[in-house]
Amino acid sequence: MRPTKNKPDFKHFYDVVVTFDKVDMLHIVNNAVYFNYF
């Protein structure tokens, strides 16, 4: 494994994980609001 080759892949993987985490939190917040008001 070469770090120079795998670094961009790791960055992309990290970005995907962070994006999914944000979307997940958004869904949790939306569900909480939905159940609280309806």
Image (cartoon, rainbow, N blue to C red):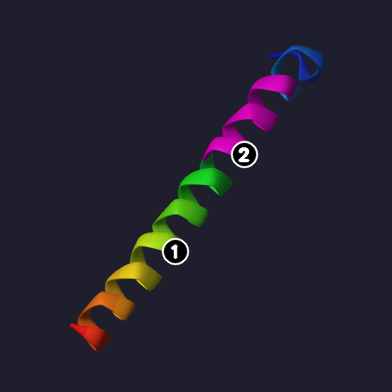
Q: Where is residue 5 in the image (x, y as percent from the top left)?
A: 75, 12
- Height in image: 19 above or below 31? above
Which amino acid, by three-letter code, is at mark 1? Met
Q: Position of residue 19 (x, y in %)?
A: 54, 45
**The N terminus is located in which quarter?**
top right
- Height in image: 18 above or below 15? below
Q: Nearer the viewer, residue 8 or 34?
A: 34
Residue drawn 28% across the image and 71% down it = 31
Q: Main secondary structure of the magenta part?
A: helix
Q: Distance between the residues labelled 1 and 2?
A: 17 Å
**Magenta stretch: includes residue 11:** yes
Q: Which of 34 and 7 is in front in this view?
A: 34
| Secondary-structure class at tag 2 | helix
Q: Where is residue 20 in the image (x, y as percent from the top left)?
A: 46, 46
Dot label at residue 14: 2
In the rendered image, which quarter is residue 14 located in? top right
Precedes in sequence: disc 1 or disc 2? 2
Q: Residue furthest front?
A: 38
Q: Which residue lies furthest to the bottom in this view?
A: 36
